[in-house]
Image (tube, helix red, strand yellow):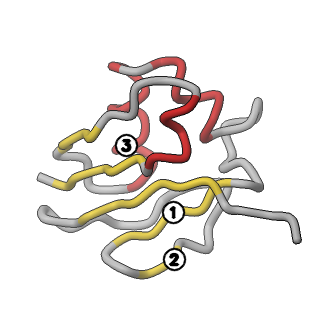
Amino acid sequence: MAQLIFTQQLARFMEVPQVETGATDLRGALDAAFADHPRLRGYVLDEQGHLRENVIIFIDGQRTRERKLLNDALAPHSKVYILQALSGG
């Protein structure tokens, strides 16, 4: 099963889960995580269901580029890291 790992930047707002899912794409995996942790959705997706500008996702070490459909494929043993991008100077 693919594993979703929400990095510790979100821990200041809520409990940060690690989720295992049989989903075959990123959208399905995120939906599975949000079903069990609904508050998490607002930190990851905007009101249109698109990835927030300050969130970056890596799947098996590769940064995702598609921010609206979130249809990146997942392999059965994929590791998906969801993190907030840091900004400032």
Q: Earlier in the sequence, mark 3 or mark 2?
A: 3
Q: Position of residue 70 (x, y in %)?
A: 54, 56
Question: Where 32 falls versus 7 (above or below)?
Answer: above
Residue denoted by label 1 = 57
**Residue drawn where x is 13% and y is 65% of the image:** 77
Q: Position of residue 52 (x, y in %)?
A: 72, 48
Q: Position of residue 35 (x, y in %)?
A: 37, 20
Q: Secondary structure at mark 2?
A: strand
Residue denoted by label 3 = 28
65 displayed left or right of 47: left
Where does the C terminus fall, quadrant-wise?
A: bottom right
Quarter of the view holding residue 31 = top left
**Residue drawn where x is 53% and y is 55% of the image:** 83
Q: Amino acid at mark 2?
A: Arg
Q: Amino acid at mark 1?
A: Ile
Q: Secondary structure at mark 3?
A: helix
Quarter of the view holding residue 84 = bottom right
Query: For the residues marked 3 and 2, what is the alpha-carbon distance in whole angstroms?
Result: 18 Å
Q: Secondary structure at mark 1?
A: strand
Q: Are marks 2 and 1 in contact (CB under 8 Å)?
A: yes
- Give the label on residue 63, or none: 2
Specify few, some or many for label 3: CA neighbours under 10 Å numbering under 14, 14-19, or 20 or more: some
Q: Are marks 1 and 3 in contact (CB under 8 Å)?
A: no
Question: Where 42 falls versus 83 (above or below)?
Answer: above
Quarter of the view holding residue 55 = bottom right
Which residue in the rendered view is the most extreme toward the right? 89
- Number of marks: 3
Specify few, some or many for label 2: CA neighbours under 10 Å numbering under 14, 14-19, or 20 or more: few
